[in-house]
Image (tube, rainbow, N blue to C red):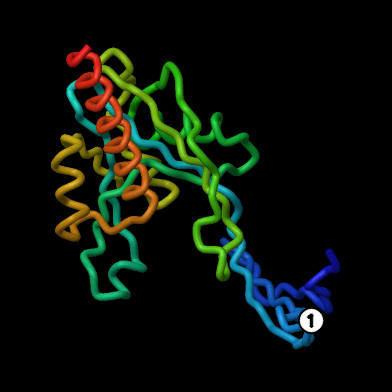
Amino acid sequence: MASTIRVKSIDTVYNGWAKVKRAVIDYRRRDGRWEEQTRELYDRGDGATIILFDPAHMVLLVRQFRFVAHARGMDADLIEACAGLLDADDPETAIRREAEEELGYRLRSVRHLYTPLMSPGSVTERLSFFTAEYSPDDKVSDGGGHPAEGEDIEVVEISLSEALAAVADGRIVDAKTIMLLQHLRLVELERQVRREATAKD
């Protein structure tokens, strides 16, 4: 298949906590015509996120200030899944570090789910999603993140059903958190179906 993209230039237009790059490309449309397009790329690195759950259907989340929510006229204290940038680490190492820093739990084992592009229209980030079980024995601190890095994190322990209700009524609006909660809900539904099938046998 012939290439549909010719990159003409990529320039960094801002270099701060994140980088903003502007790309000028030639793009071949489905009808065969070529056209010049300009795209801006927001690059802050890749990240990882995790949701912790226990056998009693409780989950651990965090509540923290997000200026973007404030700027959009929303409640700025968002309830989210634990997450962070990879920095120089692999995704599993990074999410274990974040779980201990933010939630105060040292994880025994984690399960990787998927690593999607989160906003491919302009953001380069890929986010690795994880789940892990937790128990009181795994707690090593009160969590809360690093104040020196501007983090002011409250740990939120909530039932899965209440968290899903918070998604439905708009109290939880963070996309990664919604994806992880829906994943747990699907897992519970699958377990219920298996239990009912076993009971019929």
Which image quarter: residue 82? top left
> Which quarter shows the N terminus?
bottom right
Residue type beneath disc 1: Asp
Q: Residue furthest front?
A: 201
Picture residue at 54% right of the left edge, 50% below the top: 116
93 relative position to 82: left or right: right
Helix, strand or loop under label 1: strand
Residue 35 location, x and y as percent? 75, 88
Q: How many marks?
A: 1
Where, quadrant-wise, is the C terminus in this rendering? top left
Q: Residue at (25%, 27%) from the top-left corner?
A: 193
Most foreground residue, 119 or 91: 119
User: Along the horizontal axis of the image, is 5 left or right of 49?
Assistant: right
Residue shown at 16%/35% (left/top)?
Answer: 159
Residue at coordinates 26% horizontally, 30% vertically from top-left?
A: 188
Q: Which of the two residues, 64 or 81, is positioned nearer the viewer here?
A: 81
Say whether residue 185 is left or right of residue 88: left
- Residue that numbered label 1 is attached to: 26
Q: Position of residue 87 (x, y in %)?
A: 60, 43
Taking 64 as reference, is 32 above or below it?
A: below
Q: Position of residue 29 (x, y in %)?
A: 72, 81
Horizontal relation, residue 122 to residue 179: left or right: right
Whether 18 is drawn above or below 61: the answer is below
Residue 174, percent across and down?
A: 33, 56
Number of other residues with Cα within 10 Å of mark 1, as a class: few under 14, some 14 to 19, many 20 or more: some
